[in-house]
Image (cartoon, helix red, strand yellow):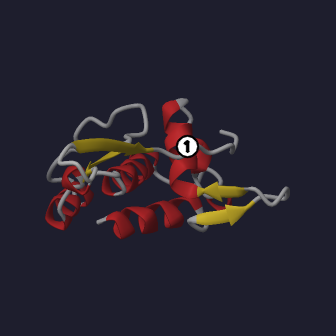
Amino acid sequence: MFSYGAFALEVACGRRPIDLHESNEKMILLDWVWMCYENGELFKVVDVKLATKFNKEQMNTVLLLGLLCSHPDPNARPTMGYVHQVLIGNVNLPPILFHKPVASYLTQNGIGFMDVITSSTSNDGEC
């Protein structure tokens, strides 16, 4: 599902998953879309070649599905059947938080205790 979400974002945004800016900084597409979503500027990520020639409701659905399918916790990602039902309009998207989720992992630290490791990425791209 993660790959499907990344693919949906690539198509909607017209960008590669990892792009280099003029200053050779890496721009990670998923992080950029999350940042724009958090800032209330989700449509800023839409491929500029589309101009305004797209259905905003459908584009919103595709972008939010891309974020949902790319959730860092595999258990929080929807099934393909659910995605299909959303795309054909049989079900609505669940509410999506306005901040990027952080992945958490449990690891055994060698002395029998479990440590929680969180990972998050930041992106210096503009939104």
Asked whether the viewer can see residue 15, the reply is no
Relative height, residue 20 to residue 107 (above, below): below
For residue 39, what is the image quadrant? Answer: top right
10 Å crowding of disc 1: few (<14), some (14-19), many (20+): some
* Above or below for 12 versus 116: below
Q: Quadrant of the N terminus?
A: bottom left
Across and down, in percent, residue 10 comes to 52, 65
- Three-letter amino acid code of the residue under disc 1: Phe
Q: Position of residue 59 (x, y in %)?
A: 44, 52
Q: Is residue 107 left or right of residue 2?
A: left
In the rendered image, the vertical position of residue 97 relative to residue 20, given as above or below = above
Q: Nearer the viewer, residue 119 or 22?
A: 119
Query: Image quarter for residue 82?
Result: bottom left
| Residue at 43% in and 51% down | 63
Residue at 43% from the left image edge and 39% from the top image edge? 100
Frontmost residue, 126 versus 115: 115
Quick one: SS at disc 1?
helix
Residue holding disc 1? 43
Q: Is residue 44 left or right of residue 110?
A: right
> Where does the image place residue 121, in percent across and percent down from the top left?
53, 46
User: In the displayed structure, does residue 99 sit left or right of residue 110?
Assistant: right
The percent coordinates of residue 91 (x first, y second) are 16, 49
